[in-house]
Image (cartoon, helix red, strand yellow):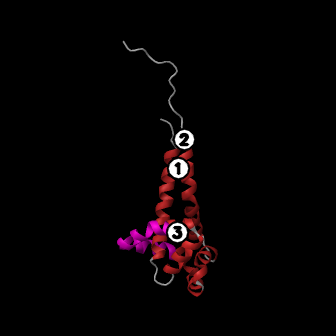
Amino acid sequence: MRFRFYALFGFLFLFCLSLDVLMFGGVSQEAGVGAAIADSARAQAPLAHTYIVLGRPIAARVAAARTAGQSIAAAAFGDSYDSIAATPDAAIDLLFSESRGPMRALLMLAYWGAPVFFVLAILAWLFRTRRTHLIKSARR
């Protein structure tokens, strides 16, 4: 049995995408800074805006997903919420620049990992090894 890189990259893409959708959907529902982050992402960060658009309906309908996304976002980006409340026009810049810690690094890896793993999964699928038939057998 051959190892299928496209399956590995596809799984990693889905993992990163689900983490991003969960976290950005939850942070967009945050009471103090959610609207400012969503508005700033729409204007300045198309990838974050995509995650917010995908995650907002899930966070609105499933309370556990909203709570989990907000707690993950607070652990990673919570120290920048005061600056975002003071300057809501630059919310997405402040979210990514003023946060520190290992949880932020993990979420930034997932943030950029989703599009990278998507491209790698497509390339791995296109260049996958295929069974080669050199001689066609005759039917009798």
Q: Which residues are magenta?
A: 51-74
Tell me the crowding category of disc 1: few under 14, some 14 to 19, or many 20 or more residues within 10 angstroms, Cα based: many
Residue 41 appears at what percent x and percent y? Answer: 55, 72
53 or 111, which lies in front? 53
Tell me the crowding category of disc 2: few under 14, some 14 to 19, or many 20 or more residues within 10 angstroms, Cα based: few
Residue 129 appears at what percent x and percent y? Answer: 54, 35
- Tell me the residue at 47%/18% (across/down): 136
| Residue at image mark 3 | 49
Q: Quadrant of the C terminus?
A: top left
- As helix, strand or loop, the secondary structure at mark 1 comes to helix
In primary-sequence order, the first of circles 1 and 3 is 1
Callouts 2 and 1 close, C-beta under 8 Å: no
Write down the quadrant of residue 87 in the picture: bottom right
Residue extending furthest toward the front: 43
Q: Which amino acid type corresponds to the residue marked 2 in the rendered image?
A: Leu
Q: Which amino acid type corresponds to the residue marked 3 in the rendered image?
A: His
